[in-house]
Image (cartoon, coloured by chain):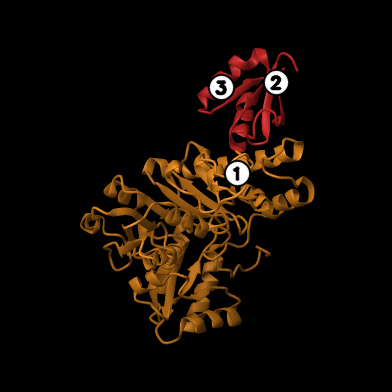
Chain colours: A orange, B red
Amino acid sequence: MNLMTFNGYFDNAATSFPKPPSVAAASAVYLNEIGGPYGRSAYGRALEVSRAVEGARSQLADLFGVKDSARIVFAMNATQAVNTVLFGLDLKDAHVLVSPLEHNAVMRPLAELERTGLCRFEVLPHAPDGLVDLEGIGRALTPGTALVVVNHMSNVNGLIQPVAQIKETIGEIPLLVDGAQSAGNLALNLEEWGIDFFAFTGHKGLLGPTGTGGLYIRRPERLRPLLYGGTGSRSDSFEMPEFSPDRFEAGTHNIAGIFGLSAALADRPDARHEEADFIRLIDKIRRLKSYRLLVAEDGGRQGRLFSLCHRSLPSSEVARRLFERHKIETRSGLHCAPLAHRTLGTFPDGTVRIAASPYHTPGDFVRLFEALEDIGG
Amino acid sequence: MKGRVLALFKSTHQVIKGEGALSGAKISYRIIPVPKSISAECGMAIEIEEKDRPALENVLRERGLDVHFHEEQ
């Protein structure tokens, strides 16, 4: 992408683009020059790869406010990380509370657990924009509540949930935070906040390759693995190792992807726009009578994405016109988050989602606004 | 080799952490495959001189790393 021209890619909540140039270069160096496995052997290539993978793990721990990087385990994406928690905890006969803006990465595994009679779930009390009602949490808890799941930054309206206060309110009950949209976009301090599980992906806000991501686990000994297989350790046993990260990393890692992710973490670009530019874009669209905006009520809880729907045109038609007339790429529909759309009153039609990246300039936002104005009338 | 010991770790993660600790403490080392006669550990062991063992134990303890030693015959 030529960044001197208009950047019309606003689908960064699905997968971010562009990436820092060093991302592809680092993956290529692994594929073309280094090769070799993570662990398992002690020759030069294996050692170099092992150092790089552990280096990436340490970078993530530093970014997330985690002291012991062994508590960060790699996975292919946030979905796998969430599944690791939901199928790895003992949720038999348990009650699970979820935020009202959950993605299907959470809802489909939970629905499967409920369908097979293992657990039941309920939605936390909340405000109309999906903000969890902290004072109402106490009434929602039951003696059997074994897990609370909260989407940190909504992939529909961008609302940022107060996860530290939620953890403070629920005490010892484990909190799983879905950080698919927040990692890379928000400052994180997982240990200080007392978060028990944090699922993240590498290919959205962290600006890394697809197929990378992982899970922070505060107490790894309490979780069963999702995948079983070779780890290069305790190879004389049919049992998975009991220690992290090996317990949760069966099979060969996405090493080329992890090289790229490490480069993305080391080479993160400064944003080419200010937060105020993004807020200004929202305020300008708010004044267009033909659109309904889906944003956080409290501007201080707004991440760098939001949704809109046209008063008469279907969202798919708005997205089509944005692309065909203005070369603007957005995602329309339900964004794999039907619960969020039910909460926000946009189910089943869905919305058009606008998700910014650090590479957007204030000029890109102006062009987007003009396109919406042109289409919206 | 006489006068040398092997530091054995349970995971690749810990070997790399251990290597970082050794580099920081300026202790000379070699990373070698774990001899099959010793264990089925993670594939890498760190070989050091016997005289450096107390220093290594100190730096590893500071970092909360588990290690056990095997004296080479």
Q: Is residue A143 above or below residue B10?
A: below
**Side of A307 where A98 appears, left or right:** left
- Amino acid type at circle 2 is Ser
Q: Are marks 2 and 3 in contact (CB under 8 Å)?
A: no
C-alpha separation, residue under disc 1 versus residue under disc 2: 25 Å
Instruction: Tell me if mark 3 has few (under 14), some (14-19) or many (20+) residues whose alpha carbon lies within 10 angstroms of its own.
Output: some
**Observer-nearest of A315 and A233:** A233
Q: Position of residue A93 (x, y in %)?
A: 31, 58
SS assignment at label 2: loop
**Please, which chain is the residue tagged with disc 2 on?**
B
Q: Nearer the viewer, residue B60 or B41?
A: B41
Query: Which residue is under mark 2?
Result: B28
In the rendering, at what x and y percent does residue A128 appear? 29, 68
The residue drawn where x is 48% and y is 80% is A373
* 1 and 3 marks on the same chain: no
Which type of secondary structure does the marked residue at label 1 adopt? Answer: helix
Report the label total: 3
Q: Amino acid at mark 3?
A: Val
Q: Give the left or right position of residue A174, taking residue A63 as reference.
A: left
Q: Position of residue A87 (x, y in %)?
A: 44, 56
**Helix, strand or loop at disc 3?**
helix
Q: Residue furthest right?
A: A33
Q: Quadrant of the C terminus of chain A?
A: bottom left
Same chain check for tags 2 and 3: yes
Label 1, on which residue?
A56
**A251 or A283: which is nearer to us?**
A251
Instruction: Provide the residue designation for mark 3.
Output: B59
Name the N-terminal-most of marks 2 and 3: 2
Q: Amino acid at mark 1?
A: Ala
Query: Residue A354, image x and y in percent?
Result: 49, 69
Q: Nearer the viewer, residue B41 or A285?
A: B41
Specify the subunit that label 3 lies on: B
